[in-house]
Amino acid sequence: MKLEIIQNQEELYNRAVDIIFNFLKNGATTYGLATGGTMLPLYECLRNSKLDFSHCRSVNLDEYVGIPKGHPESYHSYMKRQLFDAKPFKVTFIPNGEAQDIRKEANDYEELLKSLTVNLQIVGVGENGHIGFNEPGTSFDSESHVVELAASTREANARFFDSIEEVPKMAITMGISTILRAECILLIAIGEKKRFALEALLKGVITEDIPVTSLLQHPNVIVLTDLNMDDI
Ligand code: F6R
């Protein structure tokens, strides 16, 4: 694992863009994408960059179940607004949270992901250590599946909705083993609320109680954080 502590956030996101630029330059065509607050400055930097993804494919980590794709806070809408309208990809894949049979949709998403190689998977981390929507206790062997969101995750995401009642209770997410199949994983962790998760990762204890620690089993992970980790 390569840890880069960059306390200036502008520099940190520029570094993330630089990493993506290097993947593009080396011919990488398949990018795993994430949503959430952490990724907003990254997508702003990408929108303002000269990078061209028109020959690339993207696969997103997750999507809510229970709100339509057209809802402003669906991850379909988020990705369109934050990245795809400005930087079109050749093809984009996001789980369909409106599917009639959501379990079949999750299985189909996994099959699709098995048919391709993700060159670079970008992930954020939840305050409880989740990656994608793999909440604490999720098996590291998990594949794409339907998940009930933890109360703490719904509370954390309530800031994007008018009230907590509006935050969906379920989602489709890539599993942990799905995420770990990517050739390289870029984790971005910003702010004190992520200290618990990042400390667990840096302490090197692998536990299903803190899903982000699964990244310790991966040979090629880059962590970008603005957190001072001197005590670890
Ligand atoms: C989003 C995702 C989540 C977020 C995590 C952090 O696609 O998979 O794991 O990365 O919840 O969210 P923010 O960045 O809003 O703190």
Image (cartoon, rainbow, N blue to C red):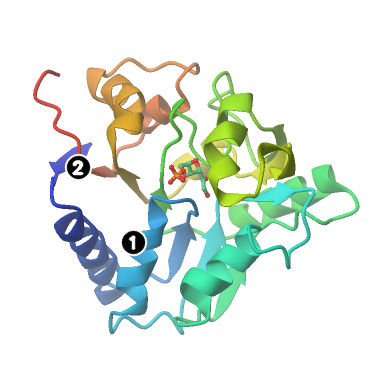
Residue 134 in sight in this render: no
> As drawn, which residue projects farthest toward the left?
230
> Which quarter shows the C terminus?
top left
For residue 180, side relative to residue 100 (left or right): left
Dot 2 lies on which element?
A: loop
Q: What residue is disc 1 on?
A: 41
Measured as percent of width and height from the top left, residue 11 is found at 14, 59
Residue 79 sits above or below residue 125 on the image: below
Q: Quadrant of the N terminus?
A: top left
- Mark 1 falls on what kind of element? helix
Which of the pair 49/162 is nearer the observer? 162
Q: Is mark 2 within 8 Å of ligand 1?
A: no
Q: Is residue 118 visible?
A: yes
Say if mark 1 contacts mark 2, CB within 8 Å.
no
Q: Which mark is residue 226?
A: 2
Left or right? Give the position of 84 relative to 29: right
Res 10 → quadrant: bottom left
Residue farthest right in this picture:
100
At x 70%, y 34%, the residue is: 147
Q: Mark number for residue 211?
A: none
Mark toward the start of the polypeptide (1 vs 2): 1
